[in-house]
Amino acid sequence: MMKNENQDQELEELIQSIFDENNGNYGYRRIHLELGNRGYKVNHKKVQRIMKKLGLKSNRFWRKTRKYSSYKGTVGKVAKNRINRRFHTNVPHQKLTTDITEFKCTDGLKLYLNPIMDMFNGEILSFGISKRPNLKLVMEPLNEALGIVKGSKYRTTIHSDQGWHYQHKKWVKTLKKNKVFQSMSRKGNCLDNSPMENFFGLLKQEMYYGKARCSYEELKEKIEAYIDYYNNKRIKQKLAGMSPVQYRIHTNQLAA
């Protein structure tokens, strides 16, 4: 008697493909959402069973991210904490957040990353990468982000820690000139900027920790590629199974 054919072969191949496309970073919940996006109706428990059968396990390296400390100046004198942990917003470009993190490279260099995120959907609007944590690292992404949020329905607030970059007169004056509210975390309180801390943790877990260390230029390319992937392809459960850019486009279409 002939063996029964594998009824789930097509589904198994698709699950394997989605897992590989996302570098092993998707667990069964996110793969279940992506299957739904592609028109496949399947129970999440079945997805979990198939992934177990195929030996597909999400690559997670839970390690505390290295916090770049740039504090210099007077506590609470430049700007108050306007956000005050009220991170949620239904309005694009209303609440932005920024911070700096650092990476070690094989060539004895460090890489510094400064993204600016829209809290509405977690989208990275702009970012700077540099070998040194200088003022240019934050000013170029700021000017790019200001061009994006210009003409928004509601006045924008940008939140940061109390690092010297964000206390610098050039940063402060640029925000005032563009009528953007400035908000700052309390000193030494990372929970006051948890959306950006979460992004840094995610980025490092998915493309840095557990990987072979590389040169500055190689790491720069990997981070640029990851941010493009994160914005345009990486789906989130809290965004109804869409990527940040997909969710923004979807929301704009509903509002039109």
Image: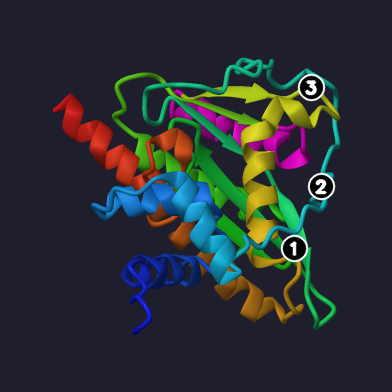
Residue that numbered label 2 is attached to: 67
Which residues, given as a range, are shown in magenta?
A: 161-179
Q: Is residue 107 above or below residue 43?
A: below
| x, y percent for residue 203 | 63, 56
What residue appears at the point 46 percent right and 39 percent down from the top-left corner? Answer: 237
Label 1 and label 3: CA atoms lie apart by 25 Å
| x, y percent for residue 235 | 43, 49
What residue appears at the point 73 percent right and 32 percent down from the top-left corner? Answer: 161
Residue 124 visible to the viewer: no
Task: Indicate the secondary structure of the residue bearing disc 2.
Answer: loop
| x, y percent for residue 196 | 64, 40
Membership of 85 in magenta stretch: no
Label 2 and label 1: CA atoms lie apart by 15 Å
Q: Mark 2 Cα within 10 Å, few/some/many (few <14, many 20+)?
A: some
Between 31 and 100, the residue placed more toward the observer is 31
Residue that numbered label 3 is attached to: 186
Amino acid on which disc 2 is placed: Lys
